[in-house]
Image: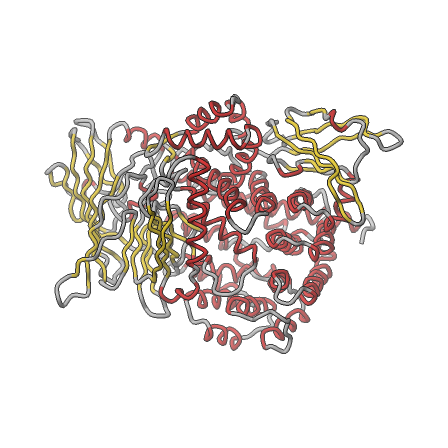
Amino acid sequence: MPAANLTRTEAEERAAIVGSPSYEVVLDLTGDGATFRSETTARFTGVAGASTFIEACTDRVHEVVLNGRVLDPATVSDGTRIRLDELEVENELRVVADARYTNSGEGLHRFVDPVDDETYLYTEFAVAEANRVYAVFDQPDLRAGVRFTITAPAHWTVLSNAPSPEPVAGPAASAVATWAFETGPVISSYIIAIIAGPYASWRGSATSVDGRDVPLGLFTRASLAQYADPEMMFSTVQAGLGFYEQAFGVPYPYGKYDQIFVPEYNWGAMENVGAVTFNEGYLFRSRVSDARREQRAIVVLHELSHMWFGNSVTMKWWNDLWLNESFATWASTLATSQVTEFTGVWSTFANDEKTHAAEQDQLPSTHPIVAEIGDLEDVEVNFDAITYDKGASVLKQLVAWVGLDAFKRGVGAYLAKHSGGNATLRDLLDELEAASGRELTRWSELWLETAGVNTLRAEIETDASGTITSAAIVQTAASSHPTLRPHRVALGGYELDDSRLDRVFRAELDVDGARTEVPELIGRARPDLLLVNDDDLTYAKVRLDERSFDTAVHHLAELADPVARAVVLGSAWDAVRDAELPAAAFVRLVLASIGHETQSSARSLALSRLDHAVSRYLADEHRERLASEAGDAIWALAELAPAGSDAQLQFVKAFTGLASTDAHGDVLGSLLEGSIALDGLAIDLDLRWELVIARSALGAGDDDEIAAALAADDTAKGRQLAETARAARPDQAVKDAAWRRAMTDEGLSNDVARAIADGWRRTNSPELLATVVHEYFAALPGVWADRSYNMASILSKRLFPTPLIDAELAELTRTWLARHPEPASMHRAVTEHLAELDRALAARARDASELSGGAQ
């Protein structure tokens, strides 16, 4: 069921009544039923005579006692809130209830490992799900310490934000024990955590700048212990902790730092104070690309940075959510570039985060970075690329604007001043202004408080000799979001020399308004490539002039700087999505250059966009042919790649996604059975599944292949991948049954529903997905009324027939949206589907027009 919603007005009114809360929470986790016993004693100050409420999303309330007065649960509780009347100056509330375990990754998630039948529990309390476990004033500015007493099976490990105590065993014949924790740090409820189960563990330590020895812990399910990488996890935290302490001048603010890999997790990770939970996808069961290892390092450092920014200092209300996530995204990229092997991570940032941000920023659902958050439903939908990636991109622009040293001084002052409390955007801007001497109110208004992305392009005039006589940067904006912004921008001039594109000059300047003259270029010879936003300083769409684009397209591989390559490829990709560049031209660009790419992350992103362009943006007239050619080309690159190389692995994995013909299916089958082998390439656990799923989607695999793969990997992950493989079959009855099961079976966990949906969407015959379109639209209102936010979001996003690029579907979607404006979360999800469908239709039309014009 959905948890209680909370409006900003209600939160402000309650914060004016309630103060200094603290909680004692007693949980009994020994049963194997659907519910657990929860007892809460909450103490807080109040305004005498006032009324308020406390959240408690319960299965059943047994007892409510306020200041000695026994209240009737049937009268004061509606299942999500408990009404509290006639408060005193000092208050004590006792609530005894049965709360429900979840299988959706919210509240207290319960998972049984099929390998050993052991039970694992963990909490996810963001955005406001702590009330699924205990009665709590569930808003970020009512920070509190919580003292947990937890009874559980004696062989379990039990973790929380405070250090774990030694368990006290139950009676002699009992197999249970009780963990009586100290009161945890005073923090917001959404970053409180409980993790319980027979987790395998590793221990380490880090030394803080103030001389403290900070205990480190690492935990996984017992069946995944062999895949833990404690050396990497501990060394990254040790290096990151030292980096952040030095950069911001503030010691690590807590007493321990545990990292726990938990099953069926919705997010990449969550920054619970001293008890960070991670998606098990970052436990590598098989060989992965360097790009994937880089991503894991970024995530580890992202969560660590939150201990300062977001946890020690927390937003007052959710409109400043970006302060947490944007900062952590930017800071973790900076830290990764400084303290790990992945020194080229800023090119990943340019290629990945900025592109995702711009894509999100061009959807009808875009919003300012500092979004207007009226209630918790608004928060849920704003965990998006605007809050994370655009915000981080804008912070990168701000760093260029004020200077890195001034920025770090300002952030350090902000953290020191507001440590242990809540703060706002204005508080941060005040410290940055003091440190830099720059006035940032206008900057904030233009960058943080308006939506949309600008486009920058150079306008160059030359004389007969090719000398530049006039140069300017022209800035434009979409009519729907017409704001023009100040940018700190670099222009790079590149010349071809012995098949290399080398930078021969660089100019850095402030761009503001519709046109900014660039006198530094006048008198120079026009370069072969003039790259706007060289070094990727600002957040903007970039368009190259015709000569520069032609140079870049034909010589992208010779462009030595990976960040410059990222800017060029990002510009081309954006032009395809805007229907300015034919998708076929982008496919040719990637195929011509990808074999020369040296960076794993850039190669990974280019291959992903190639797959997207082939499946969604190519015109009908040549999609089948170009899809076949793209698959052939990537397989050829896999065969030519050095034995055992990262490139070899990435090309083979990309081929499994691009495979579209019977011949491709035969190659996949030969790899699977071993009659084709590439030197240095092991068909390990996860690669085997990718081959099996790809063959299933082509109709080349059978039940025996899936059964054999599952027999070799009868784990939770293996069972999910088997679901994906079965649902991927190009059979109408199979597709329809998979869709209906994912949409209607409430017994499915979040990860199993995702796995089925992923298989259902995996197809080279999108018409197979058309049969459930009307059922999709009929089901959505009930899904959003009855299911939790996360499950409703999964079903809304993954069970729409995204591969079906069809004008009739677009019109049907438009009509449905007009009739269903509420709830806003549902409407937004479908609106985004429609926007991407319209974009794909336009891209296909552009590609088709190029064909009709004679291009081949």
Front in this rendered view, residue 148 or 300: 300
Q: Residue at x 16, y 28 (%)?
A: 89
Give x and y (percent) for residue 429: 46, 26
Front in this rendered view, residue 778 or 697: 697
Front in this rendered view, residue 105 or 282: 282
Q: Residue at x 47, y 66 (%)?
A: 723
Residue 835 seen in this snapshot = no
Give x and y (percent) for residue 462: 83, 30
Give x and y (percent) for residue 363: 57, 40
Q: Residue furthest left?
A: 68
629 to 16, vertically: above or below: below
- From the viewer's perspective, is 665 left or right of 852? left
Give x and y (percent) for residue 816: 52, 45
Q: Residue furthest right?
A: 464
- From the viewer's perspective, is 205 left or right of 51? right
- From the viewer's perspective, is 833 left or right of 5? right
Q: Residue furthest front?
A: 211
Front in this rendered view, residue 693 or 504: 504
